[in-house]
Amino acid sequence: MKKRKIFSWMIIIGTLMQFILANFIFTDFPGFISFVLLVPFYLCLYLFYQRYKYIKWIGFIGVFSMMGFIFLMSFIPEFPMWSNKIKLMGMFSYFGSLINIGLALVFLLQVEPKNRWIKGLTFFIVISNYLFISYFTFSIQNVLVSFFGPSETIVVTTLFVYKIITYIFQILVMIAQVVLVNILDREDEFYKKAEKN
């Protein structure tokens, strides 16, 4: 079985398990398990697709950014928002996502790769992570509450809609990750064959 199929199934199964278990089955889902389920994509980028250095570093930083956000969410019920643990995890999450946006923007301006899907999907994944899976999420929620408040009904409805949009983006990011891994793997195979000939 080709590695892209293995990686694709790891991403699909991990994301769907995390999505279903954390959102609909368990109220207190362990952060470590979430991390294990969601990190394979970033490890694949860092370990197996090193032809483009920006993708490699996006994968590397993505691991720590994801770790920061997941453990941040795990610590929130136990510690106040201003505690050092929350701030530390928030910094990992926020600055990791911000650095990845910078790397993705620079990657967009590069001549290589010629395939625009690689650049576009990478940027989509990175920007979605920043908006929905980073410490910045709390800022968005605060803005929504300030804008649509003080009516409690409207605020609750707005936050519910935001949650639904987050769910939709989680699925879209999963699809983008699978497509990106497949494109990168096919390109990697092509270059390896070309180098042999």
Image: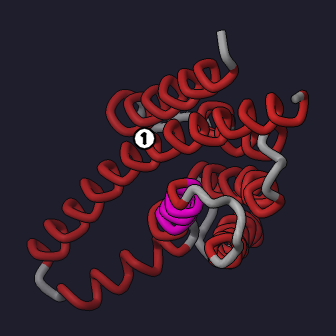
Q: Residue furthest top?
A: 1
Residue plotted at (71% across, 64% down): 112
List x then y, in percent, for residue 176: 47, 46
As drawn, is 149 to the left or to the right of 30?
A: left
Identify the image quadrant of residue 107: bottom right
Residue 159, compared with residue 10, is above or below; it is: below
**Relative to 177, does residue 159 appear above or below in the rendering?**
below
> Relative to 10, is 162 above or below?
below
At x 88% / y 35%, what residue is drawn? 195
- The quarter of the picture where residue 142 lies is bottom left
> Residue 148 location in percent, x, y?
18, 85
Q: Which residue lies under the disc numbered 1?
A: 175
Residue stretch in magenta? 118-129
- The N terminus - image quarter: top right
Q: Position of residue 165 (x, y in %)?
A: 28, 58
From the viewer's perspective, is 137 left or right of 167?
right
